[in-house]
Amino acid sequence: MILKMKDGTVQRGTNVLHEDLIFRLNGIQRIGYRSRQACRVGFFGLIAPRIARRLIGIHYRYMMPISGLAGVVISIIGVPYFVYLLFKSRA
């Protein structure tokens, strides 16, 4: 992009649209990468209620406590895995 100054001199400027596009694409890429990493662990949070339903059947009275217990067990398994992924991505 060429900028013409008031005194008639010409200077080379920055293409703002191009820089904006690069900035936005970089942000989208970073968000996608972080979402991919978080989904590996967050997916297990979706599995906990399914596991609870398999364990107790359709007894809704016990669904919430058993689902919470399954979530705790899954998070005990998932936290070391998440820490592993964190250190693996830094290396």
Image: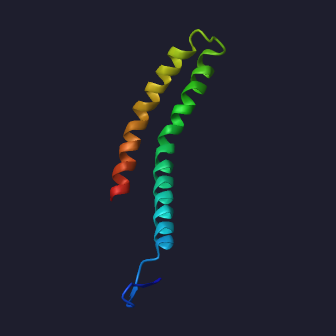
In the figure, is residue 26 to the left or right of 46? left
In the figure, is residue 23 to the left or right of 50? left
Judging depth in this view, the residue of 26 and 13 nearest the camera is: 13
| Residue drawn at the location 60% of the way across and 26% of the way down | 50
Judging depth in this view, the residue of 18 and 87 nearest the camera is: 18
| Residue drawn at the location 49% of the way across and 48% of the way down | 35
In the image, residue 7 lies at what x, y percent? 36, 88
> Would you place residue 7 above or below residue 86 in this image?
below
Q: Residue furthest top?
A: 61
| Residue drawn at the location 38% of the way across and 55% of the way down | 89
In the image, residue 69 lies at what x, y percent? 47, 20
Q: Residue furthest right?
A: 58
In the image, residue 10 lies at what x, y percent? 40, 89
Judging depth in this view, the residue of 85 and 19 nearest the camera is: 19
> Would you place residue 17 above or below residue 53 in this image?
below
* Quarter assignment of residue 54: top right
In the figure, is residue 54 to the left or right of 41? right
In the image, residue 4 lies at what x, y percent? 43, 86
- Count of residue discs: 0
Q: Residue furthest bottom?
A: 9
Judging depth in this view, the residue of 72 and 37 nearest the camera is: 37
> Would you place residue 19 above or below residue 77 in this image?
below
Quadrant assignment for the C terminus: bottom left
> Would you place residue 5 above or below residue 24 in this image?
below
Colour convention: rainbow
| Residue drawn at the location 48% of the way across and 53% of the way down | 31
